[in-house]
Amino acid sequence: MNALVPLPVLLPLCVTGLKLAIGPRLHRLQRFISIAVLGAVLVLSVVLMVAADRHGPLSVHLGDFAPPVGITLVADRLAGLMLTVSSAVTLLVLVYSLGQGMADRDDQAPVGVFHPAYLILVAGVSCTFLAGDLVNLYVGFEIMLVASFVLLTIGGTATRIRAGSTYVIISLFSSVLFLVAIAMTYAVAGTVNLAQLAQRLQEVPLGVRTLLEAMLLTVFAIKAAVFPLAAWLPDSYPTAPAPVTAVFAGLLTKVGVYSMLRTQTLLFPGHRLGDLLMLAALASMVVGILGAVAQTDLKRVLSFTLISHIGYMVFGIALAGHGSISGAIVYVAHHITVQTTLFLVAGLIERRDGTTELTRLGGLARAAPLLAVLFFVPAMNLAGIPPLSGFIGKLGLMRAGIDAGGAWAWALVAGSAATSLLTLYVMAKVWNLAFWRDAPPGAEEEGVVLESSDDDEGDDDDEGGAGAAGAAGDAGAAGDAEGGGATGSGSDLPVPAGAVVAAGFLGQSITTTKRLPWPMLAATGAAVALGLSYTVLGGPLTTFTQAAATELLARTPYIEAVLGR
């Protein structure tokens, strides 16, 4: 069974080479390979999760080199659950992206871009979850960074390049800080293997240990978008294509949360920075949700709620008790799924109406009842309405805060309750503006070009809109019709309000349509069902996370699985 541990990393990487060899040819084969590989990774993740639950942590030393020389990968309950949830989400987002047509535009590019970059991203995420040492955790982050920059700037518009540049600069800064922390850790402990560090760091002087803890927390807080290190997120994520934004918002920030959870329980038990983490958690919840209240664009609303709800997870890590760790794990799994689903719904709205600006939307509950249901369920789940999984996670965290006592714990409990109410207010605001009220005058018709072939100069000159397509819903016609081109093409046609400028690959384009592609609807519906399954399986899920919390706090099962003693 241990031999299966590296496969969630190796499979996507190996297939990426195959897909690069295939290039832009054989589109159906490209799609089939991507879906088959991610389906296999999902199956492997479930197998590893069940095996870790039944037999304890699984570990493998690649090349049969023992620590600290060899590369160690470890799958315990926490890693198995994160792998399973992330694999399911990435598979659904891939299906969604195929329906949107983003990946299909690779046929005119010199090399198929989306599929290889997406598989590399999946490999990087799996590597971070399975990493048994700090160096490979760093490698996983860098794999994700390379792939995420390609995906974030896909299409090459000026807006996306600027947003992607901000993302890369912040990520590179955190990477440099991570390297410095790794070097200092090796200097004082003589190893970067997590199991060995769990033993040796206890002998390191307290001041040095606290400095290492602070540096690692800073790195992971940047990755997780914890306030005040989250200013980059609201401007970076909303500019990307809907599937990319969904997987970034739902998954990549949780990799930082996972790293905090792993290192705080394994390397720094009884950490001295608990009060600082509580302050960061409270600030993230409050500032994030107040930012969401002030927004009028759905993607930015969801970006700020993302920052806010990261605070719940940091809340659980900061308390460092059995109940709080269990609640944090439940909330991570819940939030990966629900946040991804909401961004997928935002993509559906944009595909249908040409905008996510709430002041330009309305009447969707009557005009598109299925879309309304797909939004309403995860929105209520995010707000924590009983008996949905958001309520289960928040209840566990708040009970842990009450049990812990103390001023900070009670402040976090109060902040959690207030944030939940404000989240409900924000979701109700979105519902009323976009779904419940009548459509405002000048609402978009079919045929608004969402993805156009504008060059960067055109984007700089007219960043606010795109032209109408010649035939409603006909993306190919939209890309070819010069008279109905996007802004920057020299056309004198009026710019439809709310249209989005974003360059496609070499002239192809996506056009708004009232008939949404069925793969997009199916993938979003499956994501909603996955979020609801956490409610149906709330008992087993809570039991599993409690066992995972026990394992994390005990530390011994992890250390023995890696070191064999």
Image: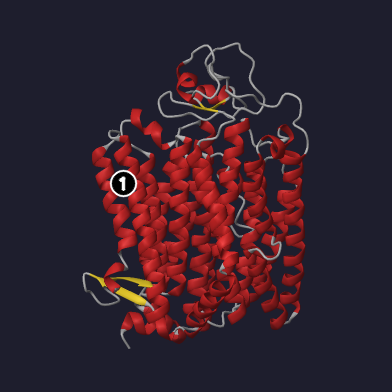
Going 33% across and 44% down the picture, which residue do you hit? 32
214 vs 316, nearest the viewer:
316
Image quadrant of residue 125? bottom left
Give how far across and how far down residue 560 sits, in percent.
Answer: 36, 85
Residue 511 percent coordinates (x, y)? 53, 27
Residue identified by numbered label 1? 33
The image shows residue 24 at horizontal and vertical percentages of 30, 34
| Residue 203 picture quarter | bottom left
Quarter holding the C terminus is: bottom left
Task: Say if residue 225 shows up in the picture.
Answer: yes
Furthest-bottom residue in this view: 565
Q: Quadrant of the N terminus?
A: bottom left
What is the tally of numbered marks visible in this picture? 1
338 and 213: which is toward the camera = 338
Q: Amino acid at mark 1?
A: Ile
Compared to residue 111, the image places residue 277 above or below, namely below
Question: Residue drawn 66% across and 41% down?
Answer: 369
- Mark 1 element type: helix
* Direction from residue 130 to residue 316 in the image, left or right: right
Residue shown at the point (29%, 73%) measured from the top left? 2
**Does 209 appear above or below 538?**
below
Does residue 393 sit above or below 528 in this rendering?
below
In the depicted view, which residue is nearer to us: 118 or 526?
A: 526
Q: Residues within 10 Å of mark 1 (few under 14, many from 20)?
A: some
Q: Position of residue 286 (x, y in %)?
A: 73, 59
Describe residue 446's horizontal placement relative to residue 184 as left or right.
right
The figure's colour scheme reads: secondary structure
Residue 145 appears left or right of 14? right
Q: Is residue 216 visible?
A: no
